[in-house]
Amino acid sequence: MRVFTLLCALCFVLKEAQAWGYKDGIFHNSIWLEQAAGVYHRESRKGRYQLTYKEAKAVCKYEGGALATYDQLEAARQIGFHVCAAGWFDRGRVGYPIVKAGTNCGFGRIGIIDYGYRLNKSEKWDVYCYNPNSKECGGVLTDQQRIIQSPGFPEEYQDEQICYWHIRVRLGQRIRLHFREFDVEDDMGCLADYLEVYDSYDDVSGFAGRFCGDDLPEDIISTGNVMTLKFLSDASVTAGGFQLQYTAAEGSLFSQNYTHYLH
Ligand SMILES: *[C@@H]1O[C@H](CO)[C@@H](O)[C@H](O)[C@H]1NC(C)=O
């Protein structure tokens, strides 16, 4: 149900503004904000419309999913999935789902805006993936305070997980992450399993740290009202996982007591 509520908040935002860009201080180019019925929209780390068909397939597969079919995209659209960006879906088709008619997007029509099967698979678009398991971890968090933990915590986490948590609190607030438990497969450089923290609404900019092993990381405080956490585990060896709590507070309330400020 929470996903649905978020989507309707998104519909409103999309109606209010152009699909992407700054709105209320939040940069809307997120990777997993738009998600329904196992379908989600993804763009390249390089930005919008940068994926060939082959790369688009690889993006979905990397995360354990596949390209969405037309029917899956339509099923998601019917529960409010609205994205103003054309992406590849199954069998080399390109289009995007529109719930609310607008002049800036979808030519005033609703439904799947269908660019058809592309003959040229080197064209570059975004992508629509389908992964019914993707909702098991991650999400968009807007509460003032929440616990975030690895999937299944305190049991060991599973292999081949990828989770994104986007934290978004009120404009003018900052976010403090406080780690309670931390045990993630240790290796030099944290290449196997890791938790990454970004002082940003996506995992492209604002890199603030990559963590593995069993040392409890210090508190981390954002510079703005958004943060992104990414947890990735590879195909072997798992560990106990992690648990942390985030708390939002007015920027001015954060004192010098906290140890790790971002700049
Ligand atoms: C296919 O698309 C790519 C990328 O837009 C373009 O560079 C290329 O010229 C196109 N090929 C053909 C045969 O139209």
Image: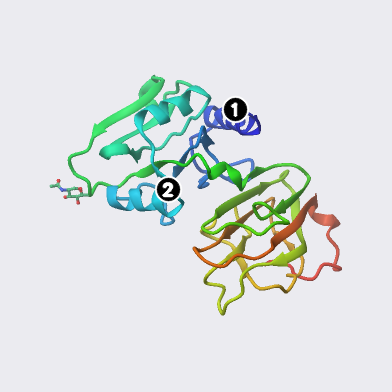
Q: Quadrant of the N terminus?
A: top right
Q: Is residue 260 above or below residue 108?
A: below
Q: Quadrant of the C terminus?
A: bottom right
Ligand 1 within 8 Å of the CB at mark 2: no
Classify mark 2: residues with Cα within 10 Å, few (<14), some (14-19) or many (20+).
Answer: many
Residue 16 horizontal side relative to residue 258, left or right: left
Report which quarter residue 115 is drawn in.
top left
Q: Amino acid at mark 1?
A: Cys
Measured as percent of width and height from the top left, residue 64 is found at 45, 50
Q: How is the image coloured?
A: rainbow
Q: In percent of the image, x 35 and y 27: which residue is there?
A: 113
Q: Please say whether residue 237 is visible from this viewpoint.
A: yes
Q: Which residue is mark 2?
A: 43
Dot placed on the residue nearer the N-terminal end, 1 or 2: 1
Q: Position of residue 144 (x, y in %)?
A: 78, 44
Image side of residue 198 versus residue 92, left or right: right
Report x, y in % for residue 25: 63, 45
Q: Residue 8: which numbered mark, if any?
A: 1
Q: Is residue 156 left or right of residue 180?
A: left
Task: Decide if residue 50 is in sight here.
Answer: no
Residue found 69% across the figure and 63% down from its top = 240
Q: Residues within 10 Å of mark 1 (few under 14, many from 20)?
A: some
As helix, strand or loop, the secondary structure at mark 1 comes to: helix
